[in-house]
Image (tube, rainbow, N blue to C red):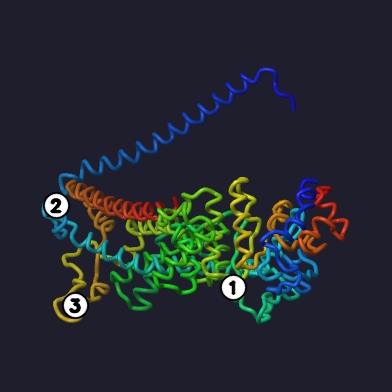
Amino acid sequence: MHPSPDPLPRIRAARRRDLLFATAALVVLFIASLVLFGLILDLVVRGAPHLDADFFTNYPSRRPSRAGILPAWVGTTLVMLVVAVLAIPLGVGAGIYLEEYARRNWLNDVIEINITNLAGVPSIIYGLLALGLFVHGVGLGESILTAGLTLALLILPIIVVATREALRALPREMREGAFALGADRWQTVALFLLPAARPGILTGIIVGLSRAIGETAPVITIGALTFIAFLPPPPITAEFPWISFDWLWSPFTVLPIQMFNWTSRPQPAFHELAAAAGVVLLVMTLAMNALAIYVRYRARRLLG
Amino acid sequence: MKADAALATTPAVRRDSPHAEPAAATRPVKARVERLSFWYGSKQALFDITMPIHERCVTALIGPSGCGKSTFLRCFNRMHDLYPNNRYAGHIWLEPEGIDIISPKTDPMVPRLRIGMVFQKPNPFPKSIYENVAAGLRIRGVRNRAILDEQVEKSLRRAALWDEVKDRLHASAFDLSGGQQQRLCIARALAPEPEVLLLDEPTSALDPIATAHIEELVDELRESYTIVIVTHNMQQAARVSQFTGFFHLGKLIEFGETEQIFTTPRESMTQDYITGRFG
């Protein structure tokens, strides 16, 4: 290879190519952001006038001026609580098992392929499965528990895959270091691998929970109500044992369903209410993300 | 050859020095390797190796890349068990009880709890300096803060790192330089008071000053530990070890006292390697 007599033309060409690509990327980024910000702005502008205290404390109503999202945000909160309690330990646990414990054999290969594919199954299919299995089969009814189970199932593959990838990305030297010190498998996982993999696992959990909070189709399929004028029984009671799980069996609605219901009405006032509910849903999702970013930041401070 | 020149005077120096020892070969044996072979899947990496590891001595393993010296070292704490399809044959007897380290009946945790290891690349855990050193004790169920504090300080002192880190024990281990990280890993290995210390090319990723630090350290540590060190650097082997094993293509070509290996090797292949004719 001989260097060309004058390298300048080549360098200029390379610069031009870089500039061209950067410009193209910026334009694409700009268009994508513009669409997103436009949508959010539209939502906020239309919804903001309705975002007052009454909106959060009122039940839905036929009159737009009196309609609120009390059962919807309570329902969403409770369903997400069930989802988090079920999906996080199960998903992380399954991920740890598959990555650190399971031997390489055909059965585990099959399980692995299945889990990856499950992440791509349309959510309505999960709704149908839940309708047959949880609502009628097990007899859990159209309850918060059923919704929590269904959505947990839906996001389980996301959490499993994220956990596995976070563990797999850890350097092999870390595992060897722990074992060489005399750690058993569980100590290696609990004391060294999990703390180091926490940022990646948390990201997976948040992606999963964010997906669950916005899901509408499977929740409609299992029979969430679109109009509801009562709250689930409170989890804390006046008498012993002060904690009650009756709310798990209660009928419910969630924010996306409330929005879906309002947008399908003819009166424009309801469309504005839907926009306001959308803002609340977005804020809830962002709050979850913010929490995760904070925890991740704290976890990463030690990683230097 | 530089190594030879330096070594020509070594025997005399040793006999006169305050470190003078009884003829090293009469030292008690900490581990006996007997007809050890090892396979990565179907590929044989070690062939029928027999050699002693003398107690409270430094045994250096030298040889060209891919000769199997690291593979050999990693048999002592069963590191190969972490990956599928690896197979051992033969015995490594850990004295004084005579436990066969590589027997399938021996739980790999038995040697790992008694034998510490320092890796080629410094591999501190993503934790504080303190927690890195305390890790081995925590694994062994030590909870008592006073014991942990004491042992952490003692280990960091022995690893010649204490003065540099005593004011920031709770800072991240990743804030340390490469040489400091490697000394931290040595402190981590020392904290549970292992009987044997395995060093797998501990200075290959370090600059000459950090390397000198570690070599001094190894020389001091052999007062209390049995050390096996893999090294690419023949001067290093000559400087720090009392016994040397020369490996080539998975076979132990020659084993003996370091002076003898470097001054009057029996095998022509050893001679060729230490004089730089191949490798």
Residue at disc 1, secondary structure: helix
Marks 1 and 3 sit apart, C-alpha to C-alpha, by 52 Å
Q: Nearer the viewer, mark 3 or mark 2?
A: 3
Q: Nearer the viewer, mark 1 or mark 3?
A: 1
Left or right for B218, reference A298 = right
Amino acid type indicated by mark 2: Pro
Quadrant housing residue B270: bottom right
Give the crowd class for mark 2: few <14, some 14-19, many >=20 residues within 10 Å. Answer: some
Amino acid type indicated by mark 1: Arg
Where does label 3 land, which residue? A242
Residue at disc 3, secondary structure: loop
| Chain that bears disc 1 | B
Q: Between residues A270 and B242, which one lies in front from this camera angle?
A: B242
Amino acid type indicated by mark 3: Trp
Where does label 2 land, which residue? A64
Where does label 1 land, which residue? B114
Q: Between residues A169 and B264, which one lies in front from this camera angle?
A: B264
The location of residue A57, given as percent across then percent down, is: 14, 58
Regarding residue B162, the answer to whether it shows in the image is yes
Marks 1 and 2 sit apart, C-alpha to C-alpha, by 74 Å
The location of residue B206, given as percent across then percent down, is: 60, 48
The location of residue A73, given as percent across then percent down, is: 23, 59
Residue ID at (25%, 49%): A279
Give the crowd class for mark 1: few <14, some 14-19, many >=20 residues within 10 Å. Answer: some
| Chain that bears disc 3 | A
Marks 3 and 2 sit apart, C-alpha to C-alpha, by 37 Å
Residue at disc 2, secondary structure: helix
